[in-house]
Amino acid sequence: MLQVSSSPHIRDSATTQRLMLDVVIALIPAILASTWIFGWRVLLVTALTTGTAVLFEYLSRRLMKRYNSIGDMSALVTGLLLAMNLPPTIPLWIPVVGSFIAIIIVKQFFGGIGQNFMNPALAARVILMLSFPAAMTRWAILADRARSATTAVAEQAGRLDLIATATPLYIMQNQGDMPTYLEMFIGIKGGCIGEVSVLALLIGAIYLIVRKVINIWIPLTYIGTVAVITALAGQ
Protein backbone atom coordinates (compact mmCIF):
# COMPACT_ATOMS: atom_id res chain seq x y z
CA MET A 1 0.00 0.00 0.00
CA LEU A 2 1.40 3.37 -1.04
CA GLN A 3 1.65 5.90 1.77
CA VAL A 4 2.32 9.58 1.08
CA SER A 5 3.53 11.76 3.93
CA SER A 6 2.52 15.38 4.39
CA SER A 7 4.32 18.20 2.60
CA PRO A 8 6.93 19.41 1.95
CA HIS A 9 8.10 16.75 -0.53
CA ILE A 10 11.63 18.08 -1.00
CA ARG A 11 14.88 16.17 -0.56
CA ASP A 12 17.47 18.42 1.02
CA SER A 13 20.44 18.08 3.32
CA ALA A 14 19.08 20.86 5.55
CA THR A 15 17.11 19.59 8.54
CA THR A 16 14.08 21.26 10.09
CA GLN A 17 16.11 21.87 13.23
CA ARG A 18 18.88 23.66 11.32
CA LEU A 19 16.42 25.87 9.45
CA MET A 20 14.62 26.77 12.67
CA LEU A 21 17.91 27.57 14.37
CA ASP A 22 18.76 29.93 11.51
CA VAL A 23 15.42 31.70 12.00
CA VAL A 24 16.09 32.03 15.74
CA ILE A 25 19.50 33.57 15.06
CA ALA A 26 17.99 35.95 12.49
CA LEU A 27 15.44 37.19 15.04
CA ILE A 28 18.02 37.98 17.73
CA PRO A 29 18.92 41.46 16.32
CA ALA A 30 15.23 42.47 16.40
CA ILE A 31 14.88 41.26 20.00
CA LEU A 32 17.99 43.15 21.11
CA ALA A 33 16.92 46.33 19.29
CA SER A 34 13.43 46.19 20.81
CA THR A 35 14.92 45.67 24.27
CA TRP A 36 16.97 48.85 23.78
CA ILE A 37 13.91 50.76 22.52
CA PHE A 38 11.17 49.42 24.82
CA GLY A 39 13.07 48.14 27.85
CA TRP A 40 13.53 44.82 29.64
CA ARG A 41 9.83 43.95 29.42
CA VAL A 42 10.53 42.80 25.86
CA LEU A 43 12.60 39.91 27.23
CA LEU A 44 9.85 39.00 29.71
CA VAL A 45 7.19 38.86 26.99
CA THR A 46 9.53 36.85 24.75
CA ALA A 47 10.34 34.42 27.56
CA LEU A 48 6.63 33.91 28.21
CA THR A 49 5.71 33.22 24.59
CA THR A 50 8.64 30.90 23.90
CA GLY A 51 8.42 29.06 27.21
CA THR A 52 4.69 28.44 27.03
CA ALA A 53 4.85 27.56 23.32
CA VAL A 54 7.40 24.82 24.01
CA LEU A 55 5.42 23.65 27.06
CA PHE A 56 2.14 23.45 25.11
CA GLU A 57 3.92 21.60 22.30
CA TYR A 58 5.27 19.03 24.74
CA LEU A 59 1.99 18.54 26.63
CA SER A 60 -0.17 18.33 23.50
CA ARG A 61 2.12 15.77 21.84
CA ARG A 62 2.07 13.68 25.03
CA LEU A 63 -1.72 13.79 25.30
CA MET A 64 -2.14 12.93 21.62
CA LYS A 65 0.41 10.10 21.94
CA ARG A 66 2.60 11.53 19.20
CA TYR A 67 6.39 11.64 19.07
CA ASN A 68 8.13 14.45 20.96
CA SER A 69 8.71 17.26 18.44
CA ILE A 70 10.35 19.81 20.73
CA GLY A 71 13.74 19.00 19.25
CA ASP A 72 12.85 20.42 15.82
CA MET A 73 12.65 23.90 17.45
CA SER A 74 9.48 24.82 15.53
CA ALA A 75 7.62 25.59 18.78
CA LEU A 76 10.46 27.87 19.86
CA VAL A 77 10.26 29.74 16.54
CA THR A 78 6.48 30.04 16.89
CA GLY A 79 6.93 31.54 20.35
CA LEU A 80 9.51 34.03 19.07
CA LEU A 81 7.34 35.06 16.11
CA LEU A 82 4.36 35.51 18.44
CA ALA A 83 6.43 37.78 20.68
CA MET A 84 7.46 39.79 17.61
CA ASN A 85 3.76 40.43 16.94
CA LEU A 86 2.90 41.74 20.42
CA PRO A 87 3.31 45.24 21.89
CA PRO A 88 5.74 45.42 24.83
CA THR A 89 3.00 46.78 27.10
CA ILE A 90 0.78 43.71 26.65
CA PRO A 91 -0.69 42.23 29.88
CA LEU A 92 1.44 39.20 30.71
CA TRP A 93 -1.40 36.68 30.58
CA ILE A 94 -2.20 37.44 26.94
CA PRO A 95 1.08 35.98 25.57
CA VAL A 96 0.18 32.70 27.32
CA VAL A 97 -3.25 32.72 25.64
CA GLY A 98 -1.57 33.48 22.33
CA SER A 99 0.80 30.53 22.69
CA PHE A 100 -2.13 28.23 23.46
CA ILE A 101 -3.96 29.40 20.34
CA ALA A 102 -0.86 29.09 18.14
CA ILE A 103 0.37 25.70 19.33
CA ILE A 104 -2.72 23.80 20.46
CA ILE A 105 -5.48 25.09 18.19
CA VAL A 106 -3.74 26.17 14.99
CA LYS A 107 -0.77 23.79 14.91
CA GLN A 108 -1.44 20.54 16.80
CA PHE A 109 -5.18 20.23 16.13
CA PHE A 110 -4.31 20.19 12.42
CA GLY A 111 -1.56 17.58 12.73
CA GLY A 112 1.57 19.49 13.69
CA ILE A 113 4.37 21.08 11.72
CA GLY A 114 3.74 21.29 7.97
CA GLN A 115 0.01 20.57 8.28
CA ASN A 116 -1.37 23.73 9.90
CA PHE A 117 -3.58 25.80 7.61
CA MET A 118 -1.71 29.05 8.30
CA ASN A 119 1.23 30.37 10.29
CA PRO A 120 0.37 29.65 13.96
CA ALA A 121 1.91 32.87 15.30
CA LEU A 122 0.05 35.05 12.79
CA ALA A 123 -3.20 33.19 13.43
CA ALA A 124 -2.75 33.86 17.15
CA ARG A 125 -2.09 37.54 16.44
CA VAL A 126 -5.33 37.85 14.45
CA ILE A 127 -7.40 36.17 17.18
CA LEU A 128 -5.75 38.24 19.93
CA MET A 129 -6.31 41.44 17.94
CA LEU A 130 -10.00 40.64 17.52
CA SER A 131 -10.38 39.57 21.16
CA PHE A 132 -8.27 42.22 22.93
CA PRO A 133 -7.99 45.20 20.55
CA ALA A 134 -7.17 47.76 23.26
CA ALA A 135 -4.31 45.74 24.74
CA MET A 136 -2.97 44.84 21.29
CA THR A 137 -2.78 48.47 20.14
CA ARG A 138 -1.23 50.15 23.18
CA TRP A 139 2.26 51.39 22.34
CA ALA A 140 5.05 52.92 24.43
CA ILE A 141 8.77 53.63 24.16
CA LEU A 142 11.39 54.37 26.80
CA ALA A 143 11.30 58.02 27.82
CA ASP A 144 14.98 58.60 27.10
CA ARG A 145 14.44 57.37 23.51
CA ALA A 146 11.63 59.86 22.87
CA ARG A 147 11.90 63.27 21.25
CA SER A 148 9.49 66.13 20.66
CA ALA A 149 8.72 65.06 17.10
CA THR A 150 7.37 61.69 18.19
CA THR A 151 5.43 62.48 21.36
CA ALA A 152 3.51 65.37 22.80
CA VAL A 153 5.01 64.92 26.26
CA ALA A 154 8.67 64.51 25.39
CA GLU A 155 9.56 67.52 27.53
CA GLN A 156 8.77 65.32 30.53
CA ALA A 157 11.11 62.56 29.33
CA GLY A 158 13.52 63.14 32.18
CA ARG A 159 10.80 62.35 34.73
CA LEU A 160 9.13 59.38 33.03
CA ASP A 161 10.15 55.77 32.42
CA LEU A 162 7.78 55.09 29.52
CA ILE A 163 5.96 57.43 27.16
CA ALA A 164 2.80 56.44 25.30
CA THR A 165 3.13 56.90 21.57
CA ALA A 166 1.55 55.79 18.30
CA THR A 167 2.60 53.99 15.17
CA PRO A 168 3.66 56.13 12.17
CA LEU A 169 0.48 55.15 10.28
CA TYR A 170 -1.70 56.36 13.16
CA ILE A 171 0.29 59.59 13.37
CA MET A 172 -0.17 60.17 9.62
CA GLN A 173 -3.90 59.51 9.88
CA ASN A 174 -4.26 62.08 12.65
CA GLN A 175 -1.84 64.62 11.11
CA GLY A 176 0.65 64.43 13.95
CA ASP A 177 4.40 64.98 13.88
CA MET A 178 6.08 62.04 12.16
CA PRO A 179 9.33 60.50 13.38
CA THR A 180 12.34 61.25 11.20
CA TYR A 181 13.43 58.69 8.60
CA LEU A 182 16.47 57.89 10.75
CA GLU A 183 14.27 57.26 13.80
CA MET A 184 11.98 54.98 11.80
CA PHE A 185 14.99 53.13 10.37
CA ILE A 186 16.50 52.58 13.82
CA GLY A 187 13.12 51.86 15.38
CA ILE A 188 12.37 54.76 17.72
CA LYS A 189 8.62 54.66 17.17
CA GLY A 190 5.55 52.88 18.41
CA GLY A 191 4.83 49.36 17.27
CA CYS A 192 5.08 45.68 18.07
CA ILE A 193 8.27 44.17 19.46
CA GLY A 194 9.47 42.79 16.15
CA GLU A 195 8.37 45.45 13.69
CA VAL A 196 9.99 48.71 14.75
CA SER A 197 13.69 48.43 13.82
CA VAL A 198 14.25 48.22 10.07
CA LEU A 199 17.99 47.97 10.68
CA ALA A 200 17.64 44.92 12.93
CA LEU A 201 15.27 43.21 10.51
CA LEU A 202 17.65 43.84 7.60
CA ILE A 203 20.50 42.27 9.57
CA GLY A 204 18.35 39.19 10.14
CA ALA A 205 17.29 39.10 6.49
CA ILE A 206 20.89 39.32 5.27
CA TYR A 207 21.80 36.42 7.55
CA LEU A 208 18.99 34.26 6.13
CA ILE A 209 19.97 35.16 2.56
CA VAL A 210 23.63 34.32 3.16
CA ARG A 211 22.59 31.03 4.76
CA LYS A 212 20.34 30.35 1.71
CA VAL A 213 17.31 29.92 3.96
CA ILE A 214 15.32 32.45 1.92
CA ASN A 215 15.48 33.63 -1.69
CA ILE A 216 16.31 37.31 -2.01
CA TRP A 217 13.85 37.80 -4.88
CA ILE A 218 10.79 37.03 -2.74
CA PRO A 219 11.24 39.94 -0.26
CA LEU A 220 12.51 42.21 -3.04
CA THR A 221 9.38 41.54 -5.09
CA TYR A 222 7.16 42.36 -2.11
CA ILE A 223 9.07 45.53 -1.20
CA GLY A 224 9.21 46.62 -4.84
CA THR A 225 5.46 46.16 -5.26
CA VAL A 226 4.77 48.26 -2.15
CA ALA A 227 7.19 50.94 -3.39
CA VAL A 228 5.51 51.14 -6.80
CA ILE A 229 1.99 51.33 -5.35
CA THR A 230 3.11 53.96 -2.82
CA ALA A 231 4.71 56.03 -5.58
CA LEU A 232 1.58 55.81 -7.73
CA ALA A 233 -0.48 56.93 -4.73
CA GLY A 234 1.74 60.00 -4.37
CA GLN A 235 3.07 59.08 -0.94
Image (cartoon, rainbow, N blue to C red):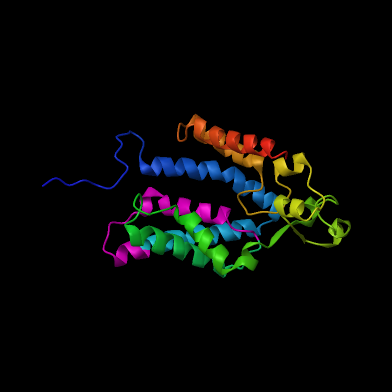
Task: Say which residue appears at 85% left-offset and 62% top-offset.
Answer: 159
Give the side of residue 122 with respect to residue 147, left or right: left
Q: Is residue 95 visible?
A: no
Q: Nearer the viewer, residue 30 or 214?
A: 214
Q: How many circles with numbers are drawn on the protein?
A: 0
Residue drawn at point x = 27 percent, y = 59 percent:
66
Q: Which residues are magenta?
A: 59-88
Expressed as whole percent of the image width and height from the top left, the position of residue 54 reads 43, 59
Picture quadrant where residue 234 is located: top right
**Residue 72 forms part of the magenta stretch:** yes
Out of 224 and 150, give the one closest to the viewer: 224
In the image, is 27 to the left or to the right of 33?
left
Residue 101 magenta-highlighted: no
Taking the image as drawn, is residue 106 in sight?
A: yes
Residue 151 in the image, given as x and y percentages of width and height? 81, 55
Measured as percent of width and height from the top left, residue 157 is found at 84, 57
Percent across and percent down for residue 204 are 56, 39
| Residue under the point 34% across and 59% down | 110
* Magenta segment main secondary structure: helix
Q: Which residue is the extreme one toward the right? A: 155
Q: Give the quadrant of the C terminus.
A: top right
For this view, does 66 lie left or right of residue 90? left
* Residue closer to the observer: 79 or 166: 166
